[in-house]
Amino acid sequence: MRTIKLRDLEVSRIGLGAMGMSHGYTGAGTDDAESIRTVHRALELGVTLIDTAEIYGPYTNEELLGRALKGRREQVVLATKFGLVSHGVEGAWNLDSSPANIRTAVEGSLKRLGADHIDLYYQHRVDPNTPIEETAGTVGELIAEGKVRAFGLSEAGPDTIRRAHAVQPVTAVQSEYSLWTRGIEERVLPVLRQLNIGLVPFSPLGRGFLTGTVRSTDQFDGSDFRRGNPRFSGENFQRNLAIADEVQALAAEVSASPAQVALAWLLAQGDDIAPIPGTKRVARVEENSAADALTLTSGQLGRLAGLPPAAGDTHTESQAQMLER
């Protein structure tokens, strides 16, 4: 696996998103043994960037990675996130990036992960009640104390990125980015490149849609968040199938899988991008990692870039309220 730099942090060109092992998707949390095998196989394939968050579970995903990485911590650039759990009375799914909450969060994450430091510590969502300068300054203190190596932001807009970066250099911004979610290209991506900040795209396979394996929401169990997602609903779902079919058609031409084609397109957008496709299966991590070796022609990249925008919002209304663009 080739590597890139997220600012000064060297990572594999393709990482691994661990959320779905414990949270959010059909079957999450049902086979921890396979999830651990998936993490180990990723490491064997040269994947070094592994991503989690305290909210995934909550907490159970970090605990799972702590078990999976026991004795292997030195092989990993380990990323986790704070700010969607308020450790006071409000609890999970409440924005809180106050200095005191960050300090509580980092100690919990370190314990669950079985680690003495976190390589990349993201603010999960921007907290409108805490100035970003305070948040950045607190993470800067954790860096000085050796508990954190690098500071990241997730789904932050240009102004927030600039203000945070002025206090504590931002190593990476995590945001949804794929063939069917390209909203960051106009306003966010130019700022990242101006400031030498890396991009870590999550959901690079369109939450599984671009793999061509999702043909009906009947495939999802009741806990799967995609059941309520606008892009997976009604007429939007049927219209979006045409996008998946086009990716599949090109994949057949180049003797690759649709997932590999979608990842190859994303990798071609720059050498400062490290997507983190999520999976809980060994076969999928092998498939996704192989995209590192796939090079598409300029014509093929143009065909993919010319696909119509996805129908429907990528988040529900309540989720969208936590995003900056």
Image (cartoon, helix red, strand yellow):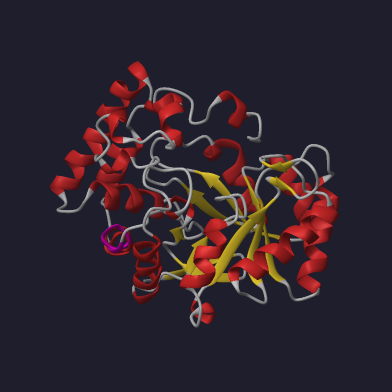
- Which is nearer the eye, 247 or 58? 58
Quadrant, the C terminus? top right
Q: In the visual, does 198 lie left or right of 103?
A: left
Q: Position of residue 238 (x, y in %)?
A: 28, 22
Determine if the magenta segment contains residue 304. no
Main SS, magenta residues: helix
Whether residue 136 is visible, yes or no, is yes
88 to the left or right of 301: right
- Residue depicted at x 83% and y 43%: 130
Above or below for 272 versus 160: below
Q: Quadrant of residue 284?
A: bottom left
Q: Is residue 145 left or right of residue 179?
A: right
- At 54% from the left and 27% from the top, the residue drawn is 316
- Residue 201 in the image, given as x and y percentages of width and height: 49, 50
- Where does the N terminus fall, quadrant-wise? bottom left
Looking at the rendering, which quadrant does residue 215 occupy?
top left
Residue 263 picture location, percent across and down: 35, 51
Q: Quadrant of residue 318?
A: top right
Q: Is residue 98 left or right of residue 241?
A: right
Identify the residue at image location x=38%, y=62%.
Answer: 35
Q: Is residue 309 visible?
A: no
- 197 or 221, which is in the foreground? 221
Q: Position of residue 54 (x, y in %)?
A: 62, 55
The magenta stretch is: 282-286
Q: Nearer the viewer, residue 88 or 72?
A: 88
Label total for image: 0
